[in-house]
Amino acid sequence: MSRRALAVVAALLGVAIVLYALLARKSDEELIRDQLDLLATTVRVSGPDENPIFRGKRMKDRFETLFTPNVRVDIAELTPIASGRAELVGVATRAGSVFRTADVEISADSVELIAGGTSAKVSGSATLVGDRGSGPERDERKVSFGLSKTQDGWRIDSVAVQPRPAD
């Protein structure tokens, strides 16, 4: 192979690597949606036999990658809840004693990057399907999240869940 052909192959290979690196990287919106999916998976209650100590440890570990230390939470049923990740870990851990099973699905209807891409607002809905022992219950609410981009990735810094509508 001639030097010229070798140079062309090397240049094409270089361009292919750069394009792959640029196109294969997830967008901020995808990374934010991944965080919300991880949150839904994390707060899941798998069954009445789930050990509360292990659940608390799992919550603490995952919440460190999901929330800022001073996350603000506004959920009518949990008021007054002190803001902060540690308080939220306690609330989420206790959900295992309220529900025998519970699954949460978070649908992000809109993700808006703000402040030059260092913050984001997410609006959507959260659906809880849980069983307290008397059969499945379904609760769907409007929810909004605020997120901040840190050196470790996107972290949730605020959560607001709309109150249950009056029947």
Image (spheres, grey):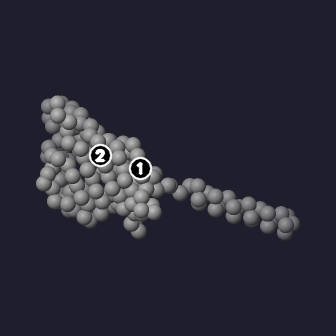
Residue topped by disc 2: 143
Q: Can residue 154 be seen at all in this image of the molecule?
A: no
Label 1 secondary element: strand
For image coordinates 25% across by 56% down, the residue present is 59
Q: Which numbered circle lies on residue 164?
A: none
Depth check: give the residue in front, 138 or 59. Answer: 138
Counting from the top left corner in percent of width and height, residue 117 is at: 45, 61
The amino acid sitting under disc 2 is Val
Residue topped by disc 1: 111
Depth check: give the residue in front, 127 or 62. Answer: 127
Q: Can residue 9 be seen at all in this image of the molecule?
A: yes
**Is residue 20 depicted above or below 152 in this figure?**
above
Counting from the top left corner in percent of width and height, residue 64 is at: 30, 62
Q: Quadrant of residue 164?
A: top left
Labels 2 and 1: the sequence-earlier one: 1
For the C terminus, the image quarter is top left
For the N terminus, the image quarter is bottom right
For image coordinates 49% across by 55% down, the residue present is 27
